[in-house]
Image (cartoon, coloured by chain):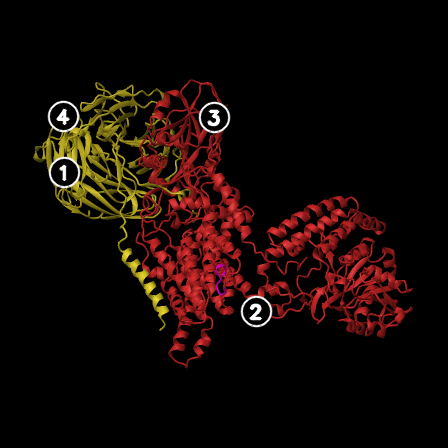
Chain colours: A yellow, B red
Amino acid sequence: MRPAPIIAVVALAGTVAAAQLTGSTASPHRPPSHVTAPVRHMTLVCPNLTGEPGTNVVTTAVIADVARALVPPSTSTGRVTTTVLKGAHSHPHVAALSPAGVIPGATANNGARAIAASGSIAATIVADQVTLVGAGRYRSLTNARCVPPSADWWFAGADGRVGYDDNLYVANPTDTAADVSVSVWSAKGQLTPPRLASVPIPPRSSVYIPVATVTPDAATLALHVHATSGAVTAALIDHRLQGVTPLGSDWIPATEAPARSLVVPGYPTGSGTRNLVIANPGDADATVNLKVVSGSGSFAPSGANQVVVPAGKTRIVDLSRAFAGSTGAATVQSDQPVVAQGLAVTTAAPKLSDLMWLAAIPPLTGPGAFADGHVPDGGGSALLLTAPQGAAQVRLTSLNGFHSTVTVPAGRSIALGTTGFNDVPIALSGLVVTPVGSAPVYVTRTMQLNGAHGALTTSEAVLSLPSAVELPVVTEDPRTAIRSAG
Amino acid sequence: MTSPTEVPESPGPRVTAILLVHDTAQWLDETLAGITAQRHPVDRLIAVDFSGHDGAFAPLGAELDPDDVVPVRRHAGTGEAVRAALKLGDDSDWLWLLTDDSAPDPDALAELLERVERAPSIWQVGPKSHSWTGGRLLEAGATMDATGHRDVGIDAPELDQGQRDGSEDVLGVATAGSLIRRDVWDHLEGLDDLWSAFGDDVDLGWRVNAAGGRVVVAPRAVIRRGASPAAGPTAASSHPTPLWVRRQLGMQVVLANTSGWMLPVLAVRALVGGVLRALGLLVISRNPSGAWAELRAVGHVVREPGRVRQAAARRRATRELGRSDLQHLFPSTADKWRRSPLVAGLFRGERAEPTRPGGSYETGPVSEEAESLESGDSRIGAFLRRPASVLFVAMVILALIANRALLSGTLHGGRLLPGYGGSGDLWSAYFASWHPVSVGSVTTAPPSLAVLGALSTLALGKVWLAVDVILLGAVPLSALTAFLSLRALTPRTRVRVWASIGYALLPAVTGAVAGGRVDVALTAILLPLAMRAGAGAIGGAAAPRGWHRSFGAGLLLAVIAAMTPVLWPAAVVLLLIGSGLARRAGEGVVTTGRRVLAAILTLLVTPLVLAPWTAHVVRHPALLVTGSGLPERFGAVQPPGGAGLLLLHVGGAGQPPLWVGAPLIIVAVLSLRRIRRLPLARAGVLTLVVGIAGAIAATRAVGVTPGVADSRHYPGALLLLAGAGALLAAAVAATGAAPALTGHSFGWRQLSALGLVLLTLAATATLAGSWLVRGAGDPLSGSGTTSVPLFTSVEMSQPASPRAIVVQTDAHGGLSYALVRRPGGPQLGDADLAPASGSLAAARLTTAVRDLTAGLPGAGAELQPFAVQFVVVPTGSVSRLAPALAQTPTLTVVPAPGATVYRSTLPTGELSLVPPTAAAGALAGHPVGSPRELPFRATAGSADVVVPPGPPGRLAVLAEPVNVHWRATIGATVLSRRTAYGWAQAFELPSSGGRLRIGYHDTRRHTLLWGELAAVVVVALLALPTGRRPDSEVTA
């Protein structure tokens, strides 16, 4: 062979070899580090502070800065104001927290209350409202967490039939007008109430919509409140009556958006009906597998281990026999995204009963807190913890220096009562629940009171405090401005 | 009408033939024999002897009665000669004019007479002129365009198969062979001797037509001509009429036959048009002698107005019809352009082997192209039978199939932004030193914008059309240029076809199309021509011929370097080594030196004509490999392996299976075993090695775009070069491989060669097949539009020039955004003008968008200084972004089809007035916007508004990054410059107010671009060949 081809082959082979050698040393791909920003602004809205001491209806809101109860304790600075949302007449008032503060409700000032925090305190502030109605049609103990505005709110379990008196409260704490559309699904399918297609919410104001007026005679409703513009808070209260006899009331807490996997914790101990309302807002029938995680273990409830929720419909599943008086949680595994909400009725026959609504919530991802564990009129409260997957450990700390560590066995639920487990005095202001690096854990707080006429109950989920805002990785790319069709 | 069965009452019309005999007796015998053999005999034959003295032409004396031979002076005009003949006394009905070189077929006169007998409205009839040796049609009637070019409607002698036999009325017929009514001749006073050198035949026909008669061609009457009919009767003499005389007489004929009121118009048109044509001939056709003739002709026409005036007066007496009545006899505009010497000059190189030796009209088969002409029945048929045409048409059809998804809408995708704008946008972007792109950019415009601008200008100003031609036509056009460039290399059509298809389907070409890489696609089209020109410049086979080749090749290289700058350093290596490779045995040092010098000259053109850019690239060498268009994004971060690059795989979109590159590389290396054309094979393999080595070097770096981890350089241009080199070597190997193999007895050589050929063909077929199946696009796309909804676009046209940002989730899980400054969205060129990364303004905008998408309530105020009035979120990203954007209190939501638009309630615009109370905060550099009064009317980067009087300390804030070249004036006062928000250009406003003018003033780039223009013009002039072109007057 003549030398020329050999030279060419050697030259080509040399370049390729160089490529292979250098190719492996190319710098590996490092994912861009995530940047976070501390939470500096927080607005919480308590839905309805109607009711003042000395009357039949007593409402109080408690605001707590739980910075000192964090592990480790920290300090916070900033400014907190409260505003009665009444449109152009809204004026903020500076709230003094040391470290908690109480906002008394008022009969005259009925309406939503916005709590705005700026500064580092925004990351550690929590608030809730408790209303005790001693007698009358609406006799009940109700409790609502004060929540920041968002674009979407999901509820299930409302009713438009006779015997129910449900109200939807939508508040807009921002300075720009908002507009919401409410989608409704019932036991018979999706409803399209024309009045709910577009509801304007003026700046710094709150509106309420009686459910029975927009969806009369519709049973077992699921609602999706969607802010097509702006951001709002939404709250739904459920009053049940038989004639003039009150059957109980509670705020239906906002539940998780449709998902295939949900956990509804917080079923209390005691006798009474235990229901799970499941709504399927999608276009395909959902096959839902249910499990109960009770104090004695987790199992599929016989007869209700698998239910089908037709597309666009809602359904009530009775879990009373499954819980059998034990505390616990219901878990939902579905092949289609569904919405779930729990209902627990505490009966005190022959006296009156009361009910509590439970939400599907996410597990604690960081310290979670509630503002006040104090039950009016000397009632008791309990902390319900569920660890559906593995054993979980949480640390309990409160503003008055109490601290304790609790372990939840795998696949179990436990209840910590004021007089029950280990004599934990949780009826304290500003309790912080911090998961200690373990399996997912779900925490709710119940309040129970044996009133003169019977049971009074309510529940509140313990949600994680807002963590530092994760700042997304943003890059400029002119392609973004071009939309490819198809 | 005479029926065939009836005997005509009177004997047939009497015909006198007048034979004009010039010096030469070359054709006379045959001509006389032809006259004698007429089926319808002539009644009388008179010969006119131009020899100037009696008895010069012996044959005349022998054949004719001496009384019928009329001597005239040597340079007598044709008309004068005929009149002299008629003085002998003639009472005929018809005159048949013949010349010594026009031999009529035996039926000619009968056919002519038959035509006029049937239609008495015909006053003059002419035959078809064939070439002397027969068969080829020279002329069948003639006309004249408005500039005095005689036009016969036939570009080159064509085989007469009756294709022009539709007996049509014509403006005039050639004198030789024409039959004219005797009374008409007398009435019109015959041929005009003023233009006997040129154009008298058309002039006579024109007058016949104008007087109300008809002039037609009788297609069945044929005469054979020894000389060109266009040259006139005197052409048979030894000296043809000079071009300038023909041009002058042509113009005068047109003017003289034009009615009075049109005359001044046409005269001016002839003058101006003549000068312009001369200019065009000089610049476009590079035909200086033609230009000189044009100028000289115009000069003579101007100097002799009386001649035209008198002639026009004579014609007025007999004219019955005006020019508009004869409109159908003049050439159409399309014909005029097609046969214009300008156009002919432009496309001279494209014609099929134009061989037309002077005097003779016979063309011998000299090439395959000409061969296909032989059997041609029409020009279209001939065109379609050329291998280049067949290849091109076939590739166009294949490309249409592959491009099936891309044929509607504006192309975009990959690195390509849609070309919504016009060529003017590209040109102004190229000339400007500040660009309204992203947050505002002072990036130096790359010359690729000028190239695209020039192509868009040619494409009627449509950028999208130019982009369509480049991208959708990349494969067929590069096949065509490769085929044409290979002509010099090998005469074997099959090898050329294979090599050019292989080139056009190289992974680099299909990848460039699929990835929307206009730069590589245009380079793919031009590279074969540039390689051919480069070889010509350094003298591939022989010593370098003429420095103009270096400048021409240099210009071509400069265009390629403008698109893909990385090929310039590659060309340095190739041309310098190539000039060494081209050295032949026994070549002198001087010749080798000339080769090297030619190579250096070729290389130096690029940095010279790209001057402002050259300096920029020297400072930023990464620009060599960055490529034009949007930043690269790849799915993988690992650079392509060496084996893939060796097999010419570029990576990314539009790639065939890996193995198809292997046979080509093997054949290319084997070409080095061929002794006959070893230098060429060496050059090919050298190009291959240089291209692959360059590609490997260019692809090793990862993360070349700041912030984009999976970005790296695209080796398309370098692998294109490598592929071209491989195909060059492979074509050398394939040419004559068969004879080389037959030298050996049948054995493993033949078998392996056969296997290799089959493998290579299979590889090419696979390339084509996979391309057709996959389609040419993706990510390149033909459908799609801006994400900005229509109503937002309309609102962006407000006087304050508010802007929009589009935010959406990207394929990599992150968020991407685009600042949209013009209602139509980003367009071609914007990506090349993007501001340099790392500017404070860009970082602040990114931070603002990040805060916005994180749901921080202050983000609205952060966006205000950037004049962002709208945040557009495409529907697919709404669920992710709506909760965050709802946290910003200054945004209100407007749902729209395809997107949700958030409108800022903060007033903002290109130019805003910040009151004194907020000025301190703005000047302190905080990123948040400040309370401001309503924005002013302003366009991107400039404003001219009236500012009302107000308190001192106000600021006019421009939503553009600070730069010393911003200038604001009120009256004669130059406002002092300040910096707002840490980055924005602001000016201190006087309390008096007044008319505020703001603009960006930087004249350095204009100065440099004038220099660049001068360099381009000088090099272009130097690239003009210096020699005279022999075929420059063919179509005059």
Q: Can marks 4 and 3 be said to lie on one chain? A: no
**Residue, disc 2:** B368
Residue drawn 30% across the image and 24% down it: A111
Q: Earlier in the sequence, mark 2 or mark 3?
A: 2
Magenta segment boundaries in residue numbering: B536-542
List the residue tagged with mark 1: A394
Is B552 part of what is drawn in magenta?
A: no
Mark 1 vs mark 4: give the one in front: 1
Residue B537: in magenta span: yes
**B334 relative to B492 in the view: left or right:** right
The crowd level at tag 2 (other Cα within 10 Å; few <14, some 14-19, many 20+) is: some
* Residue B653: % across, % down: 39, 55
- Cα separation between marks 4 and 2: 110 Å
Element under disc 4 = helix
Q: Is residue A461 above or below residue A477?
A: above
Which kind of residue does numbered mark 2 sit on?
Glu
Q: Say which chain tag 4 marks.
A: A
* Residue B52 in the image, given as x and y percentages of width and height: 83, 65
In the displayed structure, does residue B99 sit left or right of residue A178?
right
> Which chain hosts label 2?
B
Label 4 or label 2, whichever lies nearer to me, is 2
Judge whether residue B247 can be spotted in this image: yes
Q: CA distance from mark 2 to mark 3?
A: 71 Å
